[in-house]
Structures are given as C-alpha cells and as structure tokens.
C-alpha cells in the first residue's frame, strides 16, 4: 500500500533559551573574551530525534505521549509549518490540519472569505467551495458571524470554524492536534463523529490527543513518543495500555512513605497483603486485600477509632471502612503493633489507587491522626472485552467493577462480570 506520510530519520532541534544576565555577568564575559575564553554554547532541545515512521493511505494513526514528547512538532513538520533539522518528510495528497486555534485562517478576513481562501489554497475550484460552504458553516455553528472578521470571533468560534475548514475541504490527510479539547462537549462529540466518517471514507487520519478513549475509538494504530523518540508502534489498544501503565508506574514510583503521628500515636508504616497474608506491592482484582497499619504508641491508648478509605485520585473516597460506623473498636492498644482491615473480593479495575486513613480518640478526644493519604497501591488484572474504549475506560474511568448484563427486547446480548 502507498504511504500518505513518511518520516525518514527526521530530527527537529531547537536552540535552548537565552540566559538573562546581570551587568556583572556581562563584565565577566567581556573579560573572558579578552583573554581568549569563549562563552559556553547554548543547549539544544531535541523535539524529534531521528524518527522513522510511515503512515499508509487510509490509515488512522494516533500520536500519544506526555507533554513535550514531540507530538505537535511531528504534525508541524508534516504540514511544513516548520522544517526538519535533518531527515526527510514526504506527504502525498491534500492536507487538512487543525494544530492550534485559528490554524489556516487570516484574522483580518471574514469567516466567509477565509473559507474561500482556504479552499483555493488547497486547489479546490470556487464552485466546489460554494457547494461545501453550507456544510462548513452549519458544522462550525457560527451563524451570522460568518461575515465578521475572524479576529472578532471567540476562541471557541475560531476553533469550530478551523476544524470545519480542515475536515470539509475534501482532505486526503487530516491532521488534528489536541486543539479540539478546548471546545465544549457537544463540539468534541461532533469532531469525533466527523473524523470517524472521514476514516470510513478512506481518508488518512493522524490524531494527537490525551483522550485515550477517543484514540481507541478512532485509530487502529498508535505511536507512543517520549523525548522525541518512538517508544512503541503497535495496535492502538496495546499502545494505550502501555502508555497508561507507564503513567501509573511513574505515579507509584514518585510516592513517598507516609509517617502519620499525633496525640501519642504514630503510624510508622502501611503495608498491603494478599489473601495468604504475604506482603505485596500489587493486588489482583477479585481477590481479598488487607491494609495493615503498623503503629507505635507512647502509652496505653483506650478505644482508638481507625478509619480507611479507597480513592482513585479524584475528590473523595469511593469506599470507606470505619470503626466509627461498624463499632469494631479495640478496647486498648499499647506499645507497637498493627491493625488490619481486609477488603474481600476487591471489585476494582486495574490502576493505581490511594489509601486514606485517620485515627480518632474515644469520645471527646478528637483526631489523633488527621485524615490523610497514607500510601498508594496498584490493582492488576487482565483487561478483556471487545469495546472500542475497553483499555482506556478500565485504566482511567470508573474504578469500581460490578457484575452486569445487557438485554435488548428481552434477549441477552452480552455480559460482564
């Protein structure tokens, strides 16, 4: 199959930022030049580093990765907005691109004039542009403002018109950056539907996004970039899983042990244990999990009330175990020991979770240890399913997994357990 875009050993380097110096620094450097010393060279930022990538005609490909990985730079090089420092980029076909708000539009021209200009630049005859005019205006939803200068548009209106221009002027290749994320929910949905329609029509799509569900739904192939290099090039589902797993691993690695203390009680360590009592770093979904709080007290402590909560990082906890509710309060604790809380048949999707906790004294003594995050832990499981966003939803959306089953007109169509 013929390629639509080909990157051959493409690198894009930028000179590092200038360092702002004081008068004293200038005098020192002037003296250094007199005696023959040179100023150290400015650093080089490698936005792309020897990229080899071929995108076939009719293929839908996503570029994903952390901020600064080189995704937008790759699109800019492909559209000739910027040129590679070394290597070669070949593009076959008419390109429609939305890389940032206002891409391809002149601020002094009206929306109507911009549509005509954009189409003519891409080689479309005026008659064909007029035939698509109503569709472009309807998709953009700018109404009578189409006859106003684009500089008077809000950023949302510019974005809608820019995407409409890029996707309705019969592009062979559509390049879309994360710019659509600034639009409202309705506009984002229409953009996804329009891109899916173009893919079904055999157009080539290169999509940059941090929305992994959209990546899975739209793209069959994905490329993971880090530091300007290709880390993984595989089917979208596999790459999304590797990317999200890497993000969670970084979060887990960056966590520091928590020591919580107050009121004569100190939680010196928090450990996780499996059903056999073995200390583990990861818990398998669907099995029992025990959170163990290792404590130390200065003196015998009467009726301490322990509470634990599970969170996926968003506001509040989705599960709570509290002696204040169940009444299972020990009469007294002293010296060193531990308190265990076991969660049975953990119904959680695989990802990194937070364990929160607090300790209260008996009635009237207030909090001994304030409510706080005690540690992070990971739940692991195989991700199965045929849905278009199964990996992203499992790793990033609703954390709790409940058994369910679908029926349509009384007949079973599928199930999940």
Image (cartoon, rainbow, N blue to C red):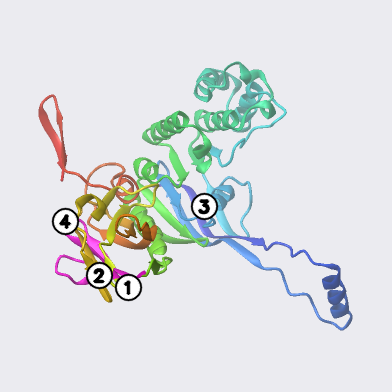
Report if the CB atoms under discs 3 and 4 are less than 8 Å apart: no
Helix, strand or loop under label 1: strand
The answer to whether any part of residue 158 appears in the image is yes
199 relative position to 68: left or right: left
**Mark 1 vs mark 3, CA separation in Å:** 53 Å
Q: Is residue 175 located in the magenta-colored stretch of the structure?
A: no
Q: Nearer the viewer, mark 2 or mark 4?
A: 2
Read off the residue under disc 1: 297
Q: Position of residue 373 (x, y in %)?
A: 38, 59
**Lower position in the chain sequence, tag 2 or tag 4:** 2
Q: Which residues are magenta?
A: 265-294
Read off the residue under disc 3: 71
Helix, strand or loop under label 2: strand
Read off the residue under disc 2: 333
Report if the CB atoms under discs 3 and 2 are less than 8 Å apart: no
Report if the CB atoms under discs 1 and 2 are less than 8 Å apart: yes
The answer to whether any part of residue 258 appears in the image is no
Image: 335 above or below 21: below
Residue at (79% x, 67% y) in the render: 21
């Amino acid at each position: 199959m013929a390629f639509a875009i080909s990157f051959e050993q493409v690198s894009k380097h930028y000179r590092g930022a200038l360092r702002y110096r004081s008068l004293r620094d200038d005098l020192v450097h002037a003296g250094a030049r007199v005696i023959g010393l040179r100023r150290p060279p400015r650093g080089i930022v490698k936005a792309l580093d020897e990229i080899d990538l071929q995108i076939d005609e009719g293929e839908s490909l996503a570029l994903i990765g952390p901020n600064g990985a080189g995704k937008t730079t790759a699109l800019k090089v492909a559209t000739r907005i910027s040129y590679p420092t070394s290597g070669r980029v070949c593009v076959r076909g008419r390109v429609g691109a939305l890389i940032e708000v206002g891409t391809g539009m002149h601020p002094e021209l009206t929306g109507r004039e911009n549509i005509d200009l954009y189409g003519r630049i891409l080689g479309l005859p005026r008659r064909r542009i007029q035939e698509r005019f109503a569709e472009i205006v309807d998709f953009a939803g700018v109404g009578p403002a189409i006859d106003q200068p684009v500089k008077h548009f809000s950023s949302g209106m510019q974005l809608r018109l820019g995407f409409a221009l890029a996707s309705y002027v019969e592009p062979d290749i559509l390049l879309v950056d994360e710019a659509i994320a600034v639009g409202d929910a309705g506009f984002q949905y229409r953009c996804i539907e329009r891109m899916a329609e173009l893919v079904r029509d055999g157009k080539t799509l290169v999509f940059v996004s941090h929305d992994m569900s959209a990546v899975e739904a739209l793209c069959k192939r994905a490329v993971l970039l880090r530091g300007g290099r290709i880390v993984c090039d595989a089917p979208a589902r596999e790459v999304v899983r590797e990317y999200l797993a890497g993000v969670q691993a970084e979060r887990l690695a960056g966590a520091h042990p928590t020591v919580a203390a107050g009121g004569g009680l100190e939680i010196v360590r928090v450990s996780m244990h499996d059903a056999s009592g073995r200390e583990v770093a990861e818990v398998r979904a669907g099995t029992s999990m025990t959170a163990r709080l290792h404590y130390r007290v200065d003196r015998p402590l009467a009726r301490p009330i322990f509470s634990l909560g599970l969170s996926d990082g968003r506001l509040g906890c989705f599960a709570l175990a509290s002696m204040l509710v169940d009444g299972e309060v020990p009469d007294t604790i002293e010296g060193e020991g531990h308190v265990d809380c076991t969660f049975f048949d953990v119904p959680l999707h695989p990802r990194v979770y937070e364990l929160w906790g607090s300790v209260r004294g008996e009635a009237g003594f207030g909090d001994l240890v304030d409510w706080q995050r005690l540690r992070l832990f990971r739940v692991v499981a195989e991700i199965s399913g045929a849905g278009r966003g199964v990996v992203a939803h499992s790793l990033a959306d609703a954390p709790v997994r409940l058994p369910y089953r679908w029926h349509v007109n009384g007949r079973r169509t599928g199930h999940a357990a």
